[in-house]
Image (cartoon, rainbow, N blue to C red):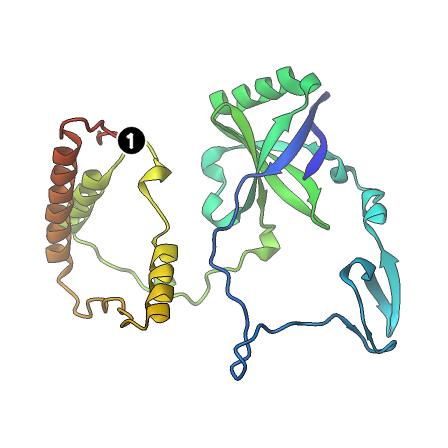
Amino acid sequence: MWRGVISFGLVSIPVRLYVATESHTAHFRQICAEHMAPIRYKRWCDVGDHEVPYDEIKKGHEVSASSYVVIDDGDLEKLPLATTRTIAISEFVPVAQLPGGLYFKAAYYVEPEELGRKPYHLLQQVLAETSVVALAKVALRDREHLCALQPLGGQLLLNTLHSPDEIRPPNGLASQGGEVKIHPNEVRMAKNLVQTLLQDVFDPGRYRDDYHEALMQLVNAKVEGAEVISAPEPTSGLMNLMDALKTSVAEAKQRRADENEREKAPGKKSSRSRPA
């Protein structure tokens, strides 16, 4: 979905970007409550009083009331902006300095062109061995983004980042006010719980999207006229923090023991790493 070069000092690496993620969300149609028929929206021109086919719609930038400048894809390609075709690395920062959970937006795989394979893998190796992230800017989807380049499984991954003015400050959140006293025993027990649930390797295969399966069960139940089973209500009562931690550790240890027993069953190979 993008083709250009990574500029690394005087080194240019011709690359292509590919979208690294895809959405599997359930899709619903809007329907009329009376006729149970799909709702259809028309692209309508009020001046000409007619429907407009999608391929005849233009992009217009409003310069004054009822006055527009038409911008097409060819115009966007000719923008006098280096980032439309170049990812110019401006600096490197330690991985720990980039709060990914707050700044990361969209992920793209970076693939080198044949002529760029050696400098591409050189950059990937240097980033991996120095534990730093390369920061740059790139123009994608009608706007310029701050982005980060980092190694991933012998390849390079590009993440677009939220700009600082897009990050909302946490002012007013309950966690911002007052000092909370935590007993050392509570810290010790919480660490014990973390250690019990610790995995050496992140394996996303251990997780699955249960929402779609539950949604299909709901759909099938409605089709068959069966009773719709509701989700259980969350526990409303609050346990003493220390009691809750002790119970959680015991339950986590029991689950770990049960998993170990299943993995030791004949013909069953271990599918996860043991914690340190």
Task: In the rendered view, tell whether residue 104 sits above or below residue 122.
Answer: below
Q: Residue 33, percent across and down? A: 51, 81
Amino acid type of disc 1?
Asp
Q: Residue 260, percent across and down? A: 15, 34
**Residue at image location 51% in from the left, 50% down from the top:** 23
**Residue at image location 33% in from the left, 59% down from the top:** 214
Q: Secondary structure at mark 1?
A: loop
Task: In the rendered view, tell whether residue 142 sits above or below residue 47.
Answer: above
Where is mark 1, residue-wise?
A: 200
Q: Nearer the viewer, residue 162 or 71?
A: 71
**Residue at image location 87% in from the left, 73% down from the top:** 66
Residue 203 image-quadrant placement: top left
Residue 15 image-quadrant placement: top right
Asked whether residue 188 appears in the rendered view, the answer is: yes
Residue farthest to the bottom, as pictured: 34
**Residue at image location 27% in from the left, 35% down from the top:** 199
Q: Report the number of discs.
A: 1
